[in-house]
Image (cartoon, rainbow, N blue to C red):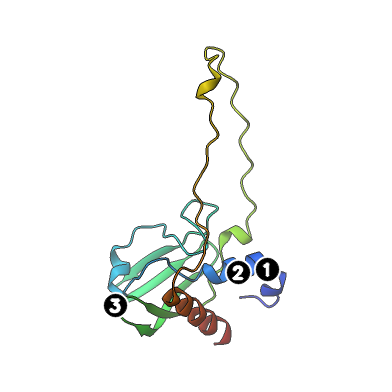
Amino acid sequence: MKEGTLNSLNDQQKSELIKFHVLPQYFSLSQFQTASNPMQTQAGGTSNREFPINITTNGTSVNITTGIVNASISNTIYIDSQLAIYQVDKVLLPLQFFVPPAPTPAPSPPNPKNNDDSSDSDSVSSVSSGVINSPRELLFFLAVFCFVYLS
């Protein structure tokens, strides 16, 4: 990470950066071989603006791509049947912090054939809150933070 990058982030982005290093479910090294891309992180979902990552494997090597950074899992810190803590060789920087969002498309013209306003409904999307839900997730979150920022 370039010097000053962390200082240029606001508090929400710093929180999202940490959550970006956490997957919402357990993965052993071998499970990364069959993982579907893009993968959701604790910072959000898998759409373009929700902090996805891509995982590729080559033998026992696991590579992580964010769109800004290509990193590798360099060490297993801790693993059991429910929690795995891996050391990555670079800070994972989300593309969303450094690339502006695409412009919103213009609204489509109203359909003159449909005068029934009862079919108009507001669409509510479910967004991951990014909340850490268990002590194991908190432990993983703290361990990743320590290894990424203190190593």
Residue at screen point 71% across, 75% down: 4
| Residue 82, quarter of picture | bottom left
Judged left or right of residue 135, residue 80 is: left
Q: Nearer the viewer, residue 8 or 132?
A: 132
Residue at screen point 36% across, 77% down: 83
In the rendered view of the protein, which quadrant contains the C terminus? Answer: bottom right
Q: Dot 1: few (<14), some (14–19), or many (≥20) neighbours within 10 Å?
A: few
Q: Which residue is mark 2?
A: 15
Looking at the rendered structure, the kind of residue marked 1 is Asp
Which mark is first along the chain, 3 or 2? Answer: 2
Q: Which residue is mark 1?
A: 11
- Image coordinates of residue 98 in percent, x first then y, are 63, 60
- Image coordinates of residue 97 in percent, x first then y, are 62, 61
Looking at the rendered structure, the kind of residue marked 3 is Ser
Evaluate if marks 3 and 1 touch, with contact meaning CB atoms under 8 Å apart.
no
Residue at screen point 58% across, 82% down: 149
Q: Nearer the viewer, residue 86 or 68?
A: 86
Q: Which residue is mark 3?
A: 81
In the rendered view of the protein, which quadrant contains the N terminus? Answer: bottom right
Q: Nearer the viewer, residue 132 or 25?
A: 132
Label 2: which secondary element: helix
Looking at the rendered structure, the kind of residue marked 2 is Ser
Label 2, label 1: how many angstroms apart (C-alpha)? 6 Å
